[in-house]
């Protein structure tokens, strides 16, 4: 498969840096365009960015000049695939502009996650929701006989960092047993707040028991992710979620304590088995392609007493695997457990990249004025799953 | 009131150090005896102890010689009031010896908290449970006509550090509305594990989602504390608790996320009012005495978005007040909130000192061979409350 | 002594908060005026300030309305004594305005520390430098028969937080032995950068080996502090200083490693004695007044192997004492040692308050249109010392 | 080259874990034997070890049974090459036993670093010192006509973690300009103290200004490393070093502030050039072999203001490169700079592995009763360098 050109909106932020780290040697994508706010546009990436990752900033990227973040300014250099990690108010303004201009906008922003025609997707959980992107105005008439041809662009989103790590172990339980109620209490890393983000005076030897809008996002996104997508729109799963969200002095990785009430009884062994067998992207078609960023096991169980832990489990599955531990009975509901996931890889940039990979395989990037994907047709089986 | 002589078992540990800090200038008590393990006995306190508090080690204490921790070794120097913070297996062995020798053992250890005749007490919550200490063998015949006169000693315990902070805001809700179900997820400070305790390699930028036996203790102790004490023993409150306990990189103070289901409906205002009016030790008698370590308000509500916080709320009420914040509706139960309390003051040494204070007022230290307390009779009103 | 009215410029910042904490119950001063940037002026202090100290914000202060930070806007409410902790560029503009308006500006800012007629003072080290404030234009003609009477206002500064902690143990060594060379490497707390200050992503489990301009300030301020003030101006001490300044993940308190070459040989005992006997504000006059913020011992030596430490030594002398430890021979120079001091009390707000206290005793606040200090005349002995 | 069998003494400690991580996929070595204290011998590695690294414990290693740590207990399974990271007192006893039994002991312990016939080596700095191992009694008669043939075993050591990071940037400066004086102040990570090591209560938001024996080690090891090895023994370099060693709340990586006085003047450009051109293991022979663990550049300069930093520079050169920054003039000496290096890779396990690699190339593992190395003769050029 020829590498497709891609761009990044919000390239200098923490998630933007992760996009660069994950995409620079990606087999399917090739970064050709970086955009930033007006303040940074015109500078090289190295000049504008306070690189904060522990792998070196690639020299090629360092020398790239940041572009203004409007489609018109981009002109013919605008790639048709854009990864976006701009702040919500900016996303609300910019992402529709780029979709209207014909771009596939793979967004990590919260701006359109709950919109009626925007898929909120984790490929292992609800890939069939991606079909809904055809309902977006920029796609709807794309079969289109009309004079004003739609652009073919669209917006696809991934969930909030704390929702992604949670929904992965929930998905196979929902499938096999049904989930009725869910209590979750999070301990979230400071990297989730971006840079400069959380002041050190607020977090050294401290806990902040509040993250603005986080509990609401977590609660509603889980229901949309586990819900269905039909002709009449998204139907949230009938699951009641109550979240407590906290910030703790951890650099990277969110830990979540979960209590769960199932609709059908399940033994400890059955739950462990559900997680172990959860390999939704394996052998299921996808035209036989392996998604490069997909971990072999999206959920791994750590049997030791005191796991998972940020320091020990952060990079499981290259940062794309949720680690679960401490499955034990709950006095109030049925079971309780602790989960951990990497909040800026699986919880942000890696989530968007994985979305882009599945979209590529489904043929959603086969814009009429673009060379078609080698592998041809979209994965019908997957979509109708 | 003349200051009574007191001793400390386990004087060099973290809680032992707090005992010294809290007792050295106490108006009612006077440290005259410090005991430690065989390894340390015979050394001065300064030699044996790695003092870890941020107030200076009092010079008088520094020069005191550590005694072996048996009643027989103590001889006539043994004070009749002992504060104990030894490890559980040692407490299981030593505390009954000292009680049999006629000492009032005010213990912070978990060894006897759930014992059938040992009161587990927080003075603001269940002072009436203290009447049960008369059921202990060393007291039972203390009215005694028999030849083998009982010693008059006894054991009284305070709860686990995470249970104390929690039970304070629960108590007035239990009284007014009844509590049916309780979900709690903790983020506990490293000082709770003593010294050397948690290795820095395990906690810097990390979370440990497991503290041995902590969830069990929290669950059962809350029920005993909110329960009743009758002739036939302790009856736990019919409350179902599910706990998730975690260690976080915080030096001092436990944060707890709570969801609660009440038996009678309560508005937000009613709950806030219950906490504000919760002053169980005020104006209620206690022979008119104020307990020196009792905070004016055992529960304070912080209305700001992101409170309580360890750094900002640790020393409320001199470390004896639980701070509550973020009271809001819970999707699953009725209400949720976050609480915070000092784990080595209110959660350990301060809890024991407060127990000693109420015991003093109740006349429980008026051993026959001791000068009686100035204030005379036990506080009948309180006991029958 | 009647309490004098004082104001605070930059009242909502970290140092401003410390000013409030230290002044609210001060026996000599009474906060009547708080100023802040235009953005905050008009709000109450509670509305405008993110209070970050672990003692509660006093209710009286919380309700005070923030004033615009110009003398003209203040009108008759402007107190004649102002504590200033605004950022350097703002200080450069505002402090002369207030001095011209007749205020004694006691500044923690770096703007005028090295100015030719502005005293840079630590009361225990170089109180005689305060005489130089009479050289300031607003004071020079204050004996003044001229028509344009000078305002009587002035600017006095305290050093950078890392210079204050260092100069205290240096001062008695300079007096007794002379200091020729000084190597210092610092490990500075995040509170020194204000709020929001250091992003948590930059400091959790990290060291930042650079603080802008800090090494230069430390080097030049030490020489001015240990130098002399004569008619012809300030003469820096002939001491060569080389500094390495680092930020470490510590909330409060700066640790400094020092190697020192003396002009006259000194034994370990002589150095320890010099520190122990260093009580420059005791019994020396000051009209018999004790400065309320002055610690009994400005320098204390901790003989243990691993001292001083931020956690254990922060609050010595109520945060006004420098703790020294590990005095031992240096292969390169004569001696090496480690020191520690509280950077926002002794190193900032407390330093300014102590300056104000000595100024009060010296009669520098006896403005012609103000009631004179009870104690009368300035302390001539001290000034000519 | 066929992979040689190797063993690890002290396999379960922090450095032992790093040995496993670095050796498990090593092209030249094959772990066949793991030894631990009597307490752990007989258990599987997984049972005995609290694995603390963020890469998974290899399954093959997890299942290996720990052997008693004596040559006699090992019998024929004893490999001829042993990596040792046991505590100093144990090393003092055990390492000579294994050398006498014919093993090449590549030790990270401090027990024999300063011994008169034991090379203390960093391959990029003083590989010629390795010739001295022929002076060890177990090697001296190894050309041997005598009846009691020597075993052929030996002991080789690498320096203390803080000395290795420092000596790398010093080496090219010593070669080109000569170093006369050196001041160094360290900020060392907690992993350097092993596990459990530093209690979290001692280091969260704290600095410990003392590491037992560390300053002495750093001072004497640097002189031996930069010195010469002749027939009459090791001659330390005539360099005066004064060290201040501190522990800071950093998980991994030591930061060091250095001031340096040279024997010949050097410009900033000349120093930067010396570091950039420092590639002592490139193109110099070694029989044309590249040492697998040797970084392309042992010293890299980071030109940014606030570098090096633990979070950003830890894994340069796979943890084997020292990063230098902030080269600037020193008021007291000639130049000052900050350096950073990984203390458990370059500073411990990686250092020993690199020593083993150069020993392999030099033919020092070609024991008479072992299959010879493919590449044949020892590297005469290197040894006589």
Image: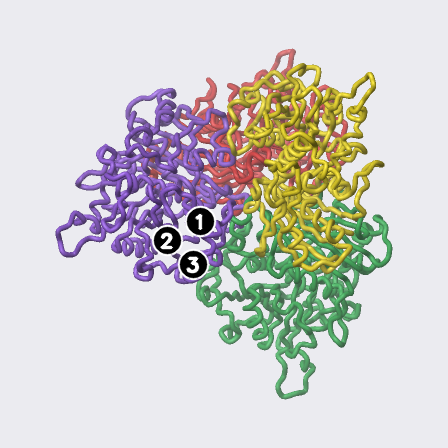
Chain colours: A yellow, B green, C red, D purple
Tell me the number on the disc at residue D65: 3
The numbered mark at residue A116 is: none
| Other residues around mark 1 within 10 Å, as few (<14) / some (14–19) / many (≥20) | many
Q: Residue at x 56, y 39 (%)?
A: C204
Q: Gap between marks 3 and 1, in whole Å? A: 15 Å
* Callout 1: SS: helix
Report the chain holding disc 2.
D
Q: What's the residue at 53%, 42% (across, down)?
A: C295
Q: Name the front one of labels 3 and 2.
A: 3
Q: Are circles 3 and 2 on residues that touch, CB within 8 Å?
A: no
**Secondary structure category for the residue under label 3:** loop
Residue A160 screen position, x and y as percent: 70, 38
The quarter in which the N terminus of chain D is drawn is top left
User: How many numbered discs?
Assistant: 3
Which label's residue is closer to the chain start, 3 or 1? 1
Mark 1 lies on residue = D17
Nearest to N terminus: mark 2 or mark 1: 2
Instruction: Answer yes or no: is residue A175 visible.
Output: yes
Disc with the residue nearer the chain's start (3 vs 2): 2
Query: Share a chain, discs 3 and 2?
Result: yes
Instruction: Classify mark 2: residues with Cα within 10 Å, few (<14), some (14-19) or many (20+).
Output: many
In the rendered image, residue D377, in percent from the top left (x then y), is placed at 23, 39
Q: Chain of mark 1?
A: D
Q: Give the x, y percent position of residue B63.
A: 47, 60
Q: Are marks 2 and 1 in contact (CB under 8 Å)?
A: no
Q: Quadrant of the C terminus of chain D?
A: top left
Circle 2 SS class: strand
Q: Which residue is mark 2?
A: D9
User: Residues under labels 2 and 1: Cα distance?
Assistant: 11 Å
A163 to the left or right of D222: right
């Amino acid at each position: 498969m020829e590498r497709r050109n891609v761009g990044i909106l919000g390239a200098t932020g923490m998630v933007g840096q992760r996009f660069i780290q994950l995409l620079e040697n990606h087999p399917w994508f090739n970064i050709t365009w970086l955009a930033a706010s007006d303040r940074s546009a015109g500078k090289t990436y190295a000049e504008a960015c306070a690189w904060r990752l522990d792998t070196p900033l690639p020299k090629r990227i360092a020398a790239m000049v940041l572009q203004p973040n409007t489609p018109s300014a981009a002109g013919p250099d605008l790639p048709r695939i854009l990864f976006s990690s701009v702040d919500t108010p900016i996303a609300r303004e910019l992402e529709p502009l780029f979709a209207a201009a014909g771009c596939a906008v793979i967004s990590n922003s919260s701006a359109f996650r709950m919109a009626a025609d925007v898929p909120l997707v984790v490929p292992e959980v609800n890939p069939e929701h991606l079909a809904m992107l055809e309902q977006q105005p920029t796609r709807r008439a794309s079969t289109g006989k009309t004079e004003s041809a739609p652009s073919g662009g669209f917006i696809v989103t991934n969930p909030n960092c704390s929702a992604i790590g949670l929904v992965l172990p929930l998905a196979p339980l929902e499938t096999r047993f049904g989930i009725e109620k869910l209590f979750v209490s999070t301990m979230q890393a400071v990297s989730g707040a971006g840079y400069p983000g959380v002041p050190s005076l607020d977090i050294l030897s401290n806990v902040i028991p509040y993250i603005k809008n986080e509990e609401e996002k977590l609660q509603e996104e889980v229901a949309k992710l586990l819900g269905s997508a039909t002709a009449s729109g998204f139907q949230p799963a009938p699951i009641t979620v109550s979240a407590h969200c906290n910030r703790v002095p951890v650099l990277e990785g969110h830990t979540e304590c979960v209590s769960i009430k199932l609709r059908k009884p399940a033994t400890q062994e059955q739950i462990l088995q559900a997680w172990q067998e959860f390999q939704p992207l394996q052998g299921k078609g996808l035209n036989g392609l392996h998604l490069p960023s997909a971990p072999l096991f999206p959920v791994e169980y750590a049997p030791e007493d005191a796991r998972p832990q940020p320091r020990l489990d952060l990079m499981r599955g290259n940062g794309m695997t949720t680690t679960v531990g401490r499955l034990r009975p709950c006095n109030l509901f049925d079971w309780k457990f602790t989960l951990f996931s990497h909040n800026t890889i699986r919880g942000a940039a890696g989530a968007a990249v994985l979305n882009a990979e599945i979209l590529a395989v489904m043929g959603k990037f086969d814009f009429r004025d673009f060379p078609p994907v080698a592998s041809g047709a979209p994965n019908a089986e997957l979509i109708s799953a």
